[in-house]
């Protein structure tokens, strides 16, 4: 077995024995003494622990802002790292730091290093940082300064992509095209480089936990205090990071990060692009993958309801071959998915909607940005003239799995899109779902919220004022 090697400020860091679930945040603070990176929520929500991680992208470096609190240390292997200590020093601040200091952009200062790292990513042209400044820091929380001075400082600093030639050469020097393995005692981890190597590893270690971005698994450790024995990190498999667009639709590899899939999904349909923009903060979208969001089988995952409504299919792979199933058939029951021993999710294919399709996708949550869904729903109506010839309606947060609303679909199919038809479809939701009440919403609220998405579609198609549609989109 080998260990972890990565670049920190251009120098190589080597760690011989690494616990599979040791977090980068703990290593920075307790082993390297880099205490500028803070621990706030320990679940990837507040952004106080934000760092920049870079990986080879041809002759350049793709930098990403990530939450170090749920980034397992082996996931840093072969990559470059910048922390707040990597930037300006006390007598030579970066333009961003100087502007934030002069603009009163910090009070208690606890969250400030995370803001600096997220916004430094914008300065150097990091992935996903072509968004408005407010979107870039949606995953960074501040409770005393207020966002105004922070946003003002950030918007006044120009983007100045840095020269990464030395980092490119250094990363090539520690790169490997072979599976890397390590561990700490009996607990082991593996980093395969190809899908074939992943299939072989799963055949040899069928109980291993697959980890892509760790945006969910990370919380099992930091919040659930679980001990995971064997992990396989799949974030370095290029085959799983491919996006193929064509007239027939979109095929997305399971390892594609949501930040990288955003533009392709938006081209498929604008509502898909807006949904992806609201999946966590940028740090989460820079780590979370399309396949991971599906494979975990969460009843409140944002992606699956929309993909089910759009008629997506899922390809699973193992050392024995591949099989493709309808995405809706993958979710069997709470915590149970149709994934056989040794299989992994390889890709998802979404057919391109017809020009005549009517589509609405909506997410309802307590916070507009960077929050978990109470209800996430999607409606696709295939039209022939004024008649609905096919209806696909799917919701998350309404049952133990993301699932279609078959009775609701039946009330829509064969009908014209009228107010009476929508009323019948809303009434049918009670046959499809018997939701639970929890901290995110009561059962009554969830049924009402699901109904509101159907009414929103009706209002939009019947020519409701834009102000009403905007209000509905924001508040459900």
Image: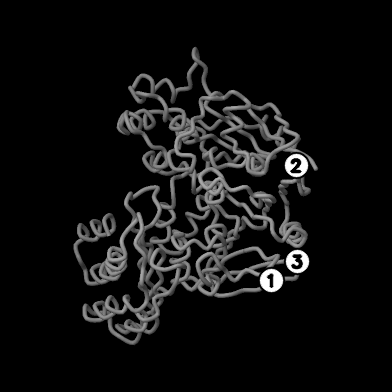
Image location of residue 227, percent across then percent down: 62, 47
Image location of residue 362, percent across then percent down: 35, 62
Q: Is residue 186 above or below residue 146?
A: below
Q: Residues within 10 Å of mark 2 (few under 14, many from 20)?
A: few
Q: Are marks 1 and 2 in contact (CB under 8 Å)?
A: no
Can residue 437 be seen at all in this image of the molecule?
Answer: yes
Query: Where does label 3 land, which residue?
Result: 319
Q: Is residue 194 above or below residue 156?
A: below
Which quadrant, please, contains the C terminus? bottom left
Query: Of helix, strand and loop, which one carries label 3?
Result: loop
**Horizontal side of residue 115 vs 462, given as left or right:** right
Query: Where does label 2 land, which residue?
Result: 185
Q: CA distance from mark 1 to mark 2?
A: 34 Å
**Horizontal side of residue 204 vs 213, given as left or right:** right
Image location of residue 457, percent across then percent down: 29, 69
Q: CA distance from mark 3 to mark 1?
A: 8 Å
Which quadrant, please, contains the N terminus? top right
Image location of residue 340, percent across then percent down: 66, 70
- Residue closer to the observer: 89 or 37: 37
């Amino acid at each position: 077995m080998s260990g972890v090697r990565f670049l920190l400020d251009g120098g190589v860091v080597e760690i011989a024995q690494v616990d599979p679930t040791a977090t980068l945040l703990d290593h920075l603070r307790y082993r390297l003494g880099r205490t500028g990176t803070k621990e706030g929520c320990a679940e990837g929500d507040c952004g106080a622990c934000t760092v920049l991680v870079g990986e080879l992208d041809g002759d350049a470096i793709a930098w990403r802002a990530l939450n170090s609190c749920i980034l397992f240390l082996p996931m840093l292997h072969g990559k470059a790292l910048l922390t707040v200590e990597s930037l300006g020093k006390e007598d030579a601040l970066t333009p961003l730091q100087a502007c934030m200091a002069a603009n009163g952009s910090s009070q208690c200062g606890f969250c400030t290093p995370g803001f600096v790292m997220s916004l430094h990513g914008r300065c150097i042209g990091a992935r996903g940082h072509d968004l408005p400044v407010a979107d870039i820091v949606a995953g960074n929380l501040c409770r005393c300064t207020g966002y105004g001075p922070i946003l003002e400082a950030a918007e006044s600093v120009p983007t100045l992509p840095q020269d990464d030639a030395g980092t490119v050469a250094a990363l090539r020097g520690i790169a490997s095209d072979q599976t890397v393995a390590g561990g700490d005692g009996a607990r082991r981890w593996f980093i395969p480089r190809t899908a074939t190597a992943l299939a072989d590893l799963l055949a040899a270690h069928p109980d291993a936990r697959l980890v892509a971005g760790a945006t969910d698994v990370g919380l099992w450790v930091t919040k659930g205090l679980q001990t995971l024995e064997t992990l396989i990190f799949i974030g370095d498999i290029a085959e799983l990071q491919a996006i193929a667009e064509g007239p027939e639709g979109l095929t997305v590899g399971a390892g594609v990060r949501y930040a990288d899939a955003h533009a392709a999904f938006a081209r498929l349909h604008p509502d898909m692009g807006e949904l992806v923009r609201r999946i966590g903060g940028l740090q989460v979208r820079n780590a979370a993958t399309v396949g991971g969001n599906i494979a975990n089988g969460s009843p409140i995952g944002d992606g699956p309801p929309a993909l089910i409504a759009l008629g997506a299919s899922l390809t699973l792979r193992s050392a024995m071959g591949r099989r493709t199933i309808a995405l809706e058939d993958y979710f069997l029951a709470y915590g149970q998915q149709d994934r056989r021993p040794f299989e992994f999710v390889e890709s998802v294919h979404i057919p391109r909607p017809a020009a005549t399709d009517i589509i609405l996708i909506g997410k309802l949550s307590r916070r507009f940005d960077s929050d978990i869904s109470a209800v996430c729903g999607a409606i696709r109506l295939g039209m022939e003239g004024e008649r609905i010839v096919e209806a696909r309606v799917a919701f998350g947060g309404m049952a133990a799995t993301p699932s279609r609303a078959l009775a609701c679909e039946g009330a829509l199919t064969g009908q014209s899109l009228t107010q009476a038809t929508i009323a019948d479809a809303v009434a049918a939701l009670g046959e499809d779902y018997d939701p639970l009440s929890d901290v995110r919403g009561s059962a009554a609220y969830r049924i009402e919220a699901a109904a509101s998405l159907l009414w929103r579609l009706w209002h939009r198609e019947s020519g409701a004022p834009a102000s009403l549609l905007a209000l509905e989109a924001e508040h459900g």
